[in-house]
Amino acid sequence: MPSSFTISDLAREYDVTSRTLRFWESEGLLSPRREGPHRLYHQRDRTRVKLILRGQRLGFTLAEIREIVGLYDAAEGEAGQLSYLLRRIAERRRELLAKRADIDASLADLAGVAENCERRLAELQVKAEGSLQEEVLS
Amino acid sequence: MPSSFTISDLAREYDVTSRTLRFWESEGLLSPRREGPHRLYHQRDRTRVKLILRGQRLGFTLAEIREIVGLYDAAEGEAGQLSYLLRRIAERRRELLAKRADIDASLADLAGVAENCERRLAELQVKAEGSLQEEVLS
DNA sequence: TTCGAACTTGACGTTTACGTAAACGTCAAG
DNA sequence: CTTGACGTTTACGTAAACGTCAAGTTCGAA
């Protein structure tokens, strides 16, 4: 496992375009080192990319994601900073729990619809067998 | 509880604009009755609005949400339709479970960061008391 | 040293999900 | 009968998150 990566290494690995990585950097979500004009990515950047992608899957905007990844490496600092951080973390936690509740509600709804479907499917099955019987008897 | 609602009734209730409700209709997500040129919304439409909002909170696009709400009232139909429906429902279920896994991972990460914060905060606390002691003794 | 692959920075285009403004219809109240 | 609150359609504007050129730079291999 190499310790540094080019932009297209990272792009390939996470299935995003180089353009996307540069855009995320311009939005303050990444800050790779430079080797002359070229970007050099390290483990820290890979971790961030994973966090960004996960945030996107959860429907957060890039601005929100920037805030979230900020939480991860702002864990140094003095007392005031730290307790502020803890409050923001508690907020994010509440958001995530709310989202999970939405998901559970959706899953329950879909399960209900599926149950309906299967019941109707079973009914149709019975009917089909009935008409088959009639054909045999006639 | 009235049985029909105007566009601004619904907009107020769910804290969206009338423009939004018209837009969702133009995208095929709602289909209120008409009283002349005016829209008349009923319980069915309210249910859909709730589903749309929940879908948005979960980061689905309007196109995906249209597909999802379609599942709810497509539960009539014949055998082929029904088993197709069941497959789509299974897909959505997998998506939702994946999202919930992302959420759980995020919650675990944040819990880790929070733990770090509290540990460092406790350390700072001890230091502060130490220097207070020194001041008293000097 | 020169070629091509990969990198760079603009700059403009695109899609999604509406906001906003214009111009008009409707209807109950004063 | 007009005013104001609400509704309508049509059309253009906008922010987010990139895609897509364009035009130039860098660098390892031939």
Image (spheres, coloured by chain):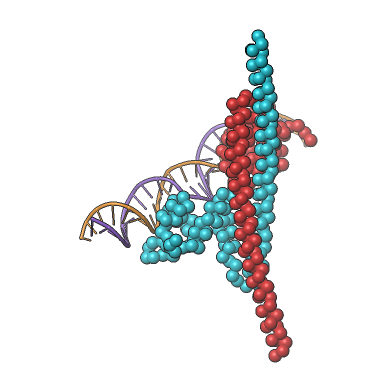
Chain colours: A cyan, B red, C orange, D purple
Q: Residue furthest front?
A: A137
Of A44 and B67, which appears nearest the observer? A44
Left or right of B111 on screen, residue A23:
left
What is the quadrant of residue B3 in the picture?
A: top right
Left or right of C3 on screen, residue B106:
right
Identify the residue at image location x=77%, y=33%.
B2
**Image quarter of the N terminus of chain A:** bottom left
Identify the residue at image location x=59%, y=70%.
A76
Q: Is residue B34 above or below residue B60?
A: above
What is the quadrant of residue A127 in the picture?
A: top right
Residue B72 visible in the snapshot: yes
Identify the residue at image location x=55%, y=58%.
A66
Q: Residue furthest right?
A: B1
- Expressed as whole percent of the image width and height from the top left, the position of residue A25 reads 47, 58
**Image quarter of the C terminus of chain A:** top right
Q: Residue furthest bottom?
A: B138
What is the quadrant of residue B61 in the picture?
A: top right
Left or right of B127 on screen, residue C14:
left
- Expressed as whole percent of the image width and height from the top left, the position of residue B106 reads 61, 56
Residue B11 visible in the snapshot: no
- Expressed as whole percent of the image width and height from the top left, the position of residue B63 reads 56, 38
- Expressed as whole percent of the image width and height from the top left, the position of residue D2 reads 68, 34
Of B124 and C22, which appears nearest the observer? B124
Identify the residue at image location x=60%, y=40%.
B92
Q: Residue furthest top?
A: A138
Task: Give the total of numbered labels.
Answer: 0
Of B106 and D20, which appears nearest the observer? B106
Of A57 and B4, which appears nearest the observer? A57
